[in-house]
């Protein structure tokens, strides 16, 4: 029986313009009120996720920076993983490379990040990966930004730590996402699903892929896997 939900935000609960789906928010509140542990899992900063937990209406547990940070409940302390210095050194190399070509990277929330760096995906992600080949970092393209963090960090590893501290088996979690940064989370959960706008790689490993895109796809999935809650 499923007891928890791990969900990505951008592209899963939002549309391509990052507007939250009101139907998805309503579904999350129904799940939370029914006793399902809802965990927001995102590449976003902890500052943003703290606010979203309150505004959406969850128990306060979240995973941020693609697994680099997480918190258990509203009163829990922020827990960190990874070495941001490595990410900052990598960012310096990438910035210098593009600066020499007359291109300035658009950085995201630089002062609010603890374990990674993120910038607009206005440069080719494969070129960034090539530049950092041999470095102990992972480069992720979330379709909304390019993230660089130290190797070993991902949503899947963070999900396992969160599940352990919540006292819920990973087999009792369903995970929903849309892009490559969700792969570890989808693989690690007992049930892994994706919305219709998901990347090809994610679709190939998901147990179920929604017919609908974005927030509508999220609602489609939770209604299928939590029928006892939505058929009341």
Image (spheres, rainbow, N blue to C red):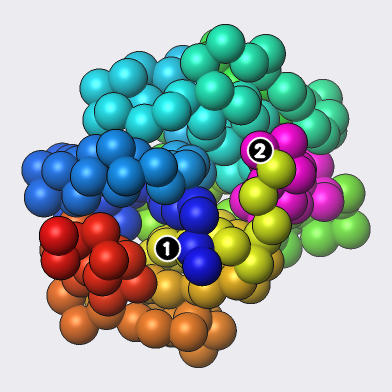
Q: Nearer the viewer, residue 177 or 17?
A: 177
183, above or below 140, in the image: below
Mark 2 surroundings: few (<14), some (14-19) or many (≥20) residues within 10 A: some
Local packing at callout 1 (Cα closer than 10 Å; few below 14, some 14-19, many 20+) is many
Q: Position of residue 229 (x, y in %)?
A: 25, 59
Report the residue marked by disc 1. Answer: 176
Judged left or right of residue 176, residue 221 is left
Closer to us: 81 or 167 = 167
Q: Disc 2 on helix, strand or loop?
A: helix
Between 229 and 225, which is closer to the camera in this rendering?
229
Residues drawn in magenta: 149-166
Q: Overall secondary structure of the magenta stretch?
A: helix
In the picture, residue 194 is in which quadrant? bottom left
Would residue 136 be found to the left or right of residue 179 on screen? right
Real-space CA distance between mark 2 and mark 1, rounded to the nearest whole angstrom: 19 Å
Examine the rendered structure and indicate whether residue 196 appears above or below residue 59: below
In this picture, is 53 found above or below 159?
Answer: above
- Mark in the foreground, 2 or 1: 2
Q: Residue 112 at x, y = what percent? A: 54, 15
Does 151 lie within the magenta span? yes
Quarter occupied by residue 77: top right
Residue 73, image x, y percentages: 54, 23
| Residue at image coords 36%, 31% | 58
Image location of residue 17, percent across then percent down: 17, 46
Q: Residue drawn 26% across and 70% down?
A: 227
Does 73 appear in magenta?
A: no
Q: Is residue 42 visible?
A: no
Q: Find disc 2 in the rendering and name its residue.
A: 166
Q: On the rendered image, what quadrant is the C terminus found in?
A: bottom left
């Amino acid at each position: 029986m499923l007891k928890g939900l791990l969900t990505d935000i951008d592209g899963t609960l939002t549309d391509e313009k990052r507007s939250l789906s009101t139907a998805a928010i309503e579904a999350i509140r129904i799940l939370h009120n029914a006793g399902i542990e809802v965990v927001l899992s995102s590449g976003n900063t902890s500052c943003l996720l703290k606010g979203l937990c309150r505004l959406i209406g969850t128990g306060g547990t979240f995973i941020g920076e693609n697994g680099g940070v997480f918190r258990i409940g509203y009163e829990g302390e922020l827990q960190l993983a990874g070495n941001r210095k490595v990410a900052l050194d990598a960012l310096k190399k990438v910035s210098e490379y593009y600066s020499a070509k007359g291109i300035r990277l658009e950085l995201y929330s630089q002062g609010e990040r603890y374990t990674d760096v993120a910038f607009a995906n206005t440069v080719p992600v494969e070129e960034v990966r090539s530049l950092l080949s041999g470095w102990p970092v992972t480069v992720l393209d979330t379709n909304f930004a390019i993230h660089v963090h130290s190797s070993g960090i991902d949503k899947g590893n963070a999900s396992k730590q969160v599940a352990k501290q919540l006292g819920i088996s990973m087999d009792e979690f369903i995970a929903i996402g849309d892009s490559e940064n969700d792969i570890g989370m989808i693989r690690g959960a007992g049930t892994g699903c994706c919305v219709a706008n998901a990347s090809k790689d994610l679709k190939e490993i998901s147990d179920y892929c929604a017919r609908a895109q974005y927030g509508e796809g999220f609602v489609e999935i939770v209604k299928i896997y939590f029928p006892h809650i939505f058929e009341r």
